[in-house]
Amino acid sequence: MSDYEFESFSEGDWDDRSDLAWSEFDWERYLREQEELFQRYLELYQRFGDRPDRLDRVAAGMGWDSGDWATAQPPEGEPDPEVEDFLAETEGKLEEEDAEDPLDPYTLYRHPIFIATKSLYIRLNQAWERLVVNPANRIPAMLVQSYQKSLHRGETHALFAIHALDMGDFALCVAQLKRAKNDLKQSMRILDDISRLNAQPTTDYHREALAQLFDLREIWLRVIQYCRDEANHRFTDED
């Protein structure tokens, strides 16, 4: 993960854009464009969902190098044809967007860890909503509420952690991610209770959601390791 992610709000960067004055319309357009990144991530996640190295495959498809992706190693071997095809499909669009707005401001919407985390929570919540709206599934209201709360808490702590990472506060990032991991464990425990209902839709959701929760855990563990390494480097440099 490069310094770009957590030093993007440095005084010099903002000085270069002192003339930037956007209206609400400008920001609405920008946010719509950034939200398309979530859909792009989820499309790739769907393509590589059965692969053990899906997180790194998706990262490659998003155009993130190993320096941007929480110390991940690039996929080994020859370039993946599916990744190459996806990049070819989106390359023109991405170049067009960059050409239209070369001075778009940096926000967390561009942070690889934010995009990955937010996208996986979007997927979890959308699938859950489809499951619970069907009365035939008969999921107890207490389980529905408890699971939704655990997802919300985990996502909130994770987003606070990414903000801390972006600002270069590695200790706070780790503390927040540890809280997010606790909420993630709670989500897994509730999923186990839901799976015992022995209905096929809940069994399917349990299998897919559990894989996504483990992927979130893997992402956060990479970030935690990165933060601890960076904190140790700073401590060593001060000595």
Image: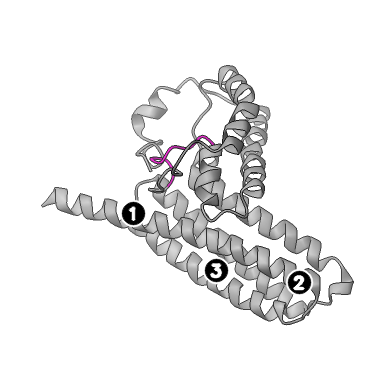
Q: Amino acid at mark 1?
A: Cys
Q: Amino acid at mark 3?
A: Leu
**CA neighbours of label 3 inside 10 A, class few (<14), some (14 to 19), many (20+):** many
- How far apart are the two marked residues, 2 and 3, measured between alpha carbons? 18 Å
Q: Residue at x 84, y 73 (%)?
A: 137
* Sequence-first tag of 1 and 3: 3
Q: Is residue 206 visible?
A: yes
Instruction: Classify residue 142 by image quadrant.
Output: bottom right
10 Å neighbourhood of mark 2: few (<14), some, or many (≥20)? many
Say which residue label 1 marks.
Answer: 227
Would residue 172 appear left or right of 35 to someone viewing this image? left
Magenta segment range?
Answer: 62-69
User: What residue is pinned by disc 2?
Assistant: 202
User: Which residue is at a point 51% across and 39% down the rendered structure image?
Assistant: 60
Determine the residue positioned at 45% across, 55% down. Answer: 161
> Is residue 65 a member of the stretch shown in magenta?
yes
Q: Which secondary structure dominates the residues rendered in magenta?
A: loop
Left or right: 173 with respect to 33?
Answer: left
| Residue at the (57%, 17%) spot, across then down | 99
**Residue at which label 3 appears:** 184
Q: Nearer the viewer, residue 168 or 128?
A: 128
Q: Position of residue 35 (x, y in %)?
A: 64, 39
